[in-house]
Amino acid sequence: MTTGTEVPTDPTWQGRLGSVLRHDVPASLVVFLIALPLSLGIAIASGAPVVAGLIAAAVGGIVAGATGGSVVQVSGPAAGLTVIVAEINVQYGWQVTCLITLLAGLVQIALGAVRVARTALAVSPAIVHGMLAGVGITIALAQIHVILGDQPQSSAVRNILDLPGELLRPNILTAAVGLSVVAVMLLWPRLPAVAQKVPGALVAVVIPTAAVALLGWNVPRISLPDNPLQSFVLPKLPEAAQIQGVVIAVFTVALVASVESLLSAVAVDKLHDGPRVRLDRELVGQGAANVVTGALGGYPVTGVIVRSSTNVRAGARSRASTVLHGVWILASVAALASLIERIPVAALAGLLVVIGVQLVNIKHIRHLRHHRELPVYVVTAAGVVMLNLIEGVLLGVALAVVIALRRLGRTRIRTEQDGDRWHVRVAGSLTFLSVPGLSRALAEIPDGAAVDVDLYVDFMDHAAFDALHSWRVDHQRRGGIVDIDEIHERWYHPSVRGTPPKPAAEKSPSPRWFAPWSSWQPDRTSARTDSHPVELTPLVVGTRDYHRRARPLVHPFLQRLAREGQKPSQMFITCADSRIVPNLITASGPGDLFTLRNIGNLVPPYGSADRSVGAAVEYAVDVLGVRLITVCGHSSCGAMNALAYQPAPAGALPEWLAYAADSRERWLRSGGGVEDLAHVNIALQLDHLLSYPSVRAKVAAGQLRLAGLYFDIEGAELFLLDQAAELFRPLSRTIDVTDGQVSALPVK
């Protein structure tokens, strides 16, 4: 990847000048040598004055290069506008075409000023590439006639129909010139890299030009005005009857030039590591260039990916390369006019045939086919060739809309029977287009059946809701049971309550087990007629959800664990609080944690009356061989509140909390708040673990580690205990417990 930077590493003017001389000047010369023949050929192909192409190339380089939002994009006359400009020129003449170019530039400046540049990128790539392909085919068909020694017809269809006759009576000299250019253009990329340092387009034009001069062939050549610098054509106002057409032409040129320039700028950004393009500024820069080129009688300007990518590969580092290439174009008009007039028209025609064919990009076609958008591409290209550019693009847009609606209505509906229950799975967007398919699927379910309907939908319109709800009411009236479960977003149940959500509905967490039942199980007191007690319903619904979605995912792991037995690497001791979910906060799965839960995440010291915790610890250490024991406490702990405020001495809870008496005593000495008691308690439970002989021995041998975690429920954040510093450090920001640069919770 070539690195491009607008400001060199050396910030001094000597350093900037040195970078321009080393990198930008050579790159500008390479781009100039490519832009010169292309600008001439594009102007001729559009029926525009030859000098108009040179004006556009110079203005595009200097004005767009200096004011645009990309530091490496090269602007000038582009093949993508050839068909449009040719049609406008035939209909209104070149002076009105210049006015259209100027006004289109003002439209571009206005669009950039209101910051809508990124909106232009919303145009489907299939339409853009299809349009360029159609333009390329149209250019190639027209220029083949020039190569054969004839004039191109007014439409691509006429060019196709007349082509067989032209092939039977070609002009041998012009055909030889044009075909030699095509041959060089095709063979040049296959030559060694050393040879390719010279632009192929330049070589392809120079060789036949020199051959024609040496052989003295009488073939049509480029004709420039006697004094190109004084031959500017000023814009002219259209006639009253032409105003409506001119307005349409202005917006057509502005839209096509803007989209092509912005797509080119985005594409060239992928080729360098320098400053990223500022799209709105680029649009303003392109508009300014079109205002100037239109005022001077030049061709419309767009960003051109071929010249831009060449600029990057040639080593351009700043805007200087683009601006200088425009300066060289301007200088060539005055200094090289006699040489330019020696170029055969057929040579430029051969160059344009290759460029036109290259606009039918095979890589784009494959990419669009992969995304199932090839029909839009084909229809757009065919419409541009057979009709005209505007109608071809409109055909592509219409087909793209039809395909989008078809995809929107292509909801995936699957119905299956599982024992005495039926399962209906609906995925996608549920709209009126989906109602026929949904109705057919629901009609397969027999009366009186119990049905689970799982909705994986991101949108549901009223027609779809009405169809589903009407079926549900009717099915339940006939003795059936219908359980509608919304997996992705909640659309159905709010609509039942008369409060349908807005399109930006809040998504429930996915997968399901991240969220509590209350967030995804609706109120079922009126929705279910199941035989289960209401208290059991959430559990039953949850287990059914597990069997439908989680079981297929976890089953392979559990099968292996059943065969191999459990081999957890860690023991996790935490509170019985329902808000603490060990596997969730540690992102662990079956077989990872040997978990022990109790009130207050306590570990009674070795030899205590309660042996249940000790039995679990010894089993984990001596039998399972865990390498880590973690004690995890949390905020808003009821056990810590009870411990702090000393409940009545009778009962099981006070007897159990007595194992945390030393935690309370240390906390009282510190004078901290109730939340600090949880911090102290975690640290002292680690001390209790060391009272177990097997734990103490393995810790001393380096075979076991102890860790303390604190879970802040409200912040959903975990803190790791740094025992040496007596601080809990946030794991969301660092896993290095020796890093003292992050905020921490003290152990008081």
Image: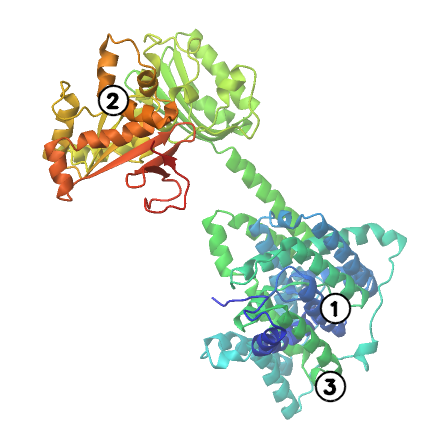
Which of discs 1 and 3 lies nearer the camera? The answer is 3
Q: Mark 2 sits on what residue? A: 660
Residue 47, numbered label: 1
Instruction: Identify which amino acid the numbered label 2 is placed on.
Output: Ala
Residue 730: quadrant of the picture: top left
Cα separation, mark 1 vs mark 3, equals 21 Å
Instruction: Identify which amino acid the numbered label 3 is placed on.
Output: Ser
Cα separation, mark 2 vs mark 1, equals 94 Å
Q: Which residue is drawn at 70% across and 67% down?
A: 60
- Residue at the limit of the structure toward the front, as seen here: 669
How packed mark 1 is, by other alpha carbons closer than 10 Å (few <14, some 14-19, many 20 or more), is some
Q: Which of 582 and 653 is in front in this view?
A: 653
> Who comes first in sequence, dot 1 or dot 3?
1
Residue 338, numbered label: 3
Q: Residue at x 23, y 8 (%)?
A: 651
Q: In this view, does 281 lie to the left or right of 526?
A: right
